[in-house]
Image (cartoon, rainbow, N blue to C red):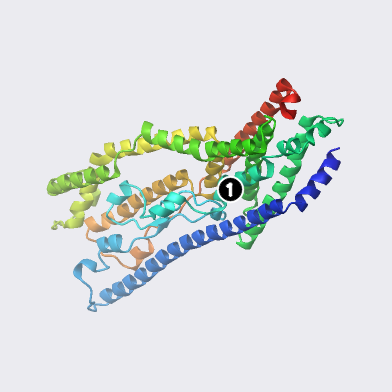
C-alpha cells in the first residue's frame, strides 16, 4: 500500500507546477546563500592576509634599519621610531593574532559580523582588557546575513508549510476523504504515509541543493565530511519537525486556510517570538554594565595611576629585582608605563569581573533558553560547527589576552635593562598560534533534542486522533 501511495504522490508532485517552483526556489536559495557565505569568508581571509603582509613589510624595514644602525650609518628616522629600541618594536611592529575561519564557516555567519577576526596586540594593553568588537553596519545587523543557516532556519519551514498545510483538508474539501476512509487503511496511517512521502521528496531536494551549493564553493572535501554529515542530520531533523507539526495540524480537522494560518503562527512562535523573548529576558535578568562606563572607569583609573607613576615604578623594581639595571639610569615613559599596567589591571579588575560575569550569565541563559525552540537549537549548532559562535570569539579573546601578556613580558627585560634590538631579538619575537576548540558534541546533543521534539509532536497527533476518532477529521 505504501508503494502504491508513494507512486501516485510522486506523480502528483511532479505534475504540480507549484511544487516544482518551490524546488527550484530552494536550490537557488541554497546556491546564493553559499555564494554569499563564501564571499564573507574570503573577505575575512583577505583582511587577515593583508594584516600579515603589513607585518612582513614592517619587519623587513625594521631589519634594514637595524643593519644600517649596526654598521654606523645615519638613518632618517625619528628618535622615538628607532627600531633598535625595544619599545618601538613592541609598540609599532606587533604580530597578527587572528582566528582563521573553519572550512565550513560559509554555512553560518553567526557572530562573525560583530567581532573582529584579528587584532595586533602592542605594548599598550588597555584595549586587551575589553573585547574585540568592531564598527559594524547597523542595517546589516538588523536584517542579518543571507547564509545557509538563514535559509534552513527561516525559509525552509515556509517551504514545508507550502508543501503540507492542506495534506488532509484538501481531500476533505474535495469530497475524497470519505472515500479514502472507506478503504482498508486507517486515515491516520494514510496521512502519515503521505507526509512521509513528502519528507523523502523534500529531504532529497534539500540534500542535493546542499551538496551542490557547497561543491560549487569548494567546501566539499574529505576534511569537511564529518561536520557536513552533522549539518545534514541537523537540517533534516529540523525539516522533519515542521512536517510533524503539519501532521498534527492536519489532524485537527480545520480548513486549508485555517491550517495555513496555524502553521504560520507556529513559525512566528518558534522562529521569531521565542528567540526574541529569550534574548530580551537575558538582557533584563543579567544586564551587562555599560561599555561606555567601563571605558570611562578605565580612563579614570589610568589618570590616577599616572600621577603616582614614579612611586609605582620604584615599588615595581623593588619587587622585581631581575628587571633592575646594574647601572643607574634615568627612567623613561615606557618603564613607568609598564610598571603602572599591573596597578591599572588590579584597580579595574572588579569592574571587568562584573562585566564578564554578567556576560557569562547571559550566555548561560541563552544556552538554557535554546531548549524552548528547535530554531534556536539549530542556530546554536550551525554557529558552533562553523566556528562563529559566541564561545569561539570568547575563546579567541582569551587567547589574544594571553598572547598580549606574553608580548609585553618579552620586551620588559629589554626595556628596563636598556638592551638594543638586533637580528637575534627580531628572530625570537613571540608569535601567535590559535588553538581550536571542539564543538561537535554540542551539535549532536542539539540534534537529539530536536528528535525529541519530533517524537513529542508525532505522539501528540496519534493521541489526539485516538481520542477524537475519525469523525473529527471527516466533519
Q: Is residue 367 above or below residue 316?
A: above
133 vs 325, left or right, is right
366 vs 81, left or right, is right
Name the residue rendered at 32%, 47% in the picture.
Answer: 130
Kindly give the residue lying farthest to the top in the view shown: 467
Q: Is residue 51 above or below residue 375?
A: below
Residue 357, quarter of the rendered image: top left
346 vs 175, left or right, is left
In the depicted view, which residue is nearer to us: 465 or 118? 465
At which x and y percent is residue 360? 40, 37
Q: Is residue 9 above or below residue 103?
A: above
295 vs 26, left or right, is left
Residue 67, quarter of the rendered image: bottom left
Badge 1: residue crowd in 10 Å (few <14, some 14–19, many ≥20): some
- Could you tell me if residue 438 is visible in this image? no
At which x and y percent is residue 35? 56, 60
Quadrant containing the C terminus is top right
Name the residue rendered at 63%, 47% in the picture.
Answer: 159
Name the residue rendered at 54%, 55% in the picture.
Answer: 106
Name the residue rendered at 41%, 57% in the picture.
Answer: 118
SS label for mark 1: helix
Q: Which residue is mark 1?
A: 155
In the depicted view, which residue is nearer to us: 419 or 401? 401
Quadrant containing the N terminus is top right
Please give the count of numbered marks on the rendered protein.
1
At which x and y percent is residue 56? 39, 68
Kindly give the residue lying farthest to the bottom in the view shown: 73
At which x and y percent is residue 58? 34, 69
- Could you tell me if residue 344 is visible in this image? yes
Amino acid at each position: 500500500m505504501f508503494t502504491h501511495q508513494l507512486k501516485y504522490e510522486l506523480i502528483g508532485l511532479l505534475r504540480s507546477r507549484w511544487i516544482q517552483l518551490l524546488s527550484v526556489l530552494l536550490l537557488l536559495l541554497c546556491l546564493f546563500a553559499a555564494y554569499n557565505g563564501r564571499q564573507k569568508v574570503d573577505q575575512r581571509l583577505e583582511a587577515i592576509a593583508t594584516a600579515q603582509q603589513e607585518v612582513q613589510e614592517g619587519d623587513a624595514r625594521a631589519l634594514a634599519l637595524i643593519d644600517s644602525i649596526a654598521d654606523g650609518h645615519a638613518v632618517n628616522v625619528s628618535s622615538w621610531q628607532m627600531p633598535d629600541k625595544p619599545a618601538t618594536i613592541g609598540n609599532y611592529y606587533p604580530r597578527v593574532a587572528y582566528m582563521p575561519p573553519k572550512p565550513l564557516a560559509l554555512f553560518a555567519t553567526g557572530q562573525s559580523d560583530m567581532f573582529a577576526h584579528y587584532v595586533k596586540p602592542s605594548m599598550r594593553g588597555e584595549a586587551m582588557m575589553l573585547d574585540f568588537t568592531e564598527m559594524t553596519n547597523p542595517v546589516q545587523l538588523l536584517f542579518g546575513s543571507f547564509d545557509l543557516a538563514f535559509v534552513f532556519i527561516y525559509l525552509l519551514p515556509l517551504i514545508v508549510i507550502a508543501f503540507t498545510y492542506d495534506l488532509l483538508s484538501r481531500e476533505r474539501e474535495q469530497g475524497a476523504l470519505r472515500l479514502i476512509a472507506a478503504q482498508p487503511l486507517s486515515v491516520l496511517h494514510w496521512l502519515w504515509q503521505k507526509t512521509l512521502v513528502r519528507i523523502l521528496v523534500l529531504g532529497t531536494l534539500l540534500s542535493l541543493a546542499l551538496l551542490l551549493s557547497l561543491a560549487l564553493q569548494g567546501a566539499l572535501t574529505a576534511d569537511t565530511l564529518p561536520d557536513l554529515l552533522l549539518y545534514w542530520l541537523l537540517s533534516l531533523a529540523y525539516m522533519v519537525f515542521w512536517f510533524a507539526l503539519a501532521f498534527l495540524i492536519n489532524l485537527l480537522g480545520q480548513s486549508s486556510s485555517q491550517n495555513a494560518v496555524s502553521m504560520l503562527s507556529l513559525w512566528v512562535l518558534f522562529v521569531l517570538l521565542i528567540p526574541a523573548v529569550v534574548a530580551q529576558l537575558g538582557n533584563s535578568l543579567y544586564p551587562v554594565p555599560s561599555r561606555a562606563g567601563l571605558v570611562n572607569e578605565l580612563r579614570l583609573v589610568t589618570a590616577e595611576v599616572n600621577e603616582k607613576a614614579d612611586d609605582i615604578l620604584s615599588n615595581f623594581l623593588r619587587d622585581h629585582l631581575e628587571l633592575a639595571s646594574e647601572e643607574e639610569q634615568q627612567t623613561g615613559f615606557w618603564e613607568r608605563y609598564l610598571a603602572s599596567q599591573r596597578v591599572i589591571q588590579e584597580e579595574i579588575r572588579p569592574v571587568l569581573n562584573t562585566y564578564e560575569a554578567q556576560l557569562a550569565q547571559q550566555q548561560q541563559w541563552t544556552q538554557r533558553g535554546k531548549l524552548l525552540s528547535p530554531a534556536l537549537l539549530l542556530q546554536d549548532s550551525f554557529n558552533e560547527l562553523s566556528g562563529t559562535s559566541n564561545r569561539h570569539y570568547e575563546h579567541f579573546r582569551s587567547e589574544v589576552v594571553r598572547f598580549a601578556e606574553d608580548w609585553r613580558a618579552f620586551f620588559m627585560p629589554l626595556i628596563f635593562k636598556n638592551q638594543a634590538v638586533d637580528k637575534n631579538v627580531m628572530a625570537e619575537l613571540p608569535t601567535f598560534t590559535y588553538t581550536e576548540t571542539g564543538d561537535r558534541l554540542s551539535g549532536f546533543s542539539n540534534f537529539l533534542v530536536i528528535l525529541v521534539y519530533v517524537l513529542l509532536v508525532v505522539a501528540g497527533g496519534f493521541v489526539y486522533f485516538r481520542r477524537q476518532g475519525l469523525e473529527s477529521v471527516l466533519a
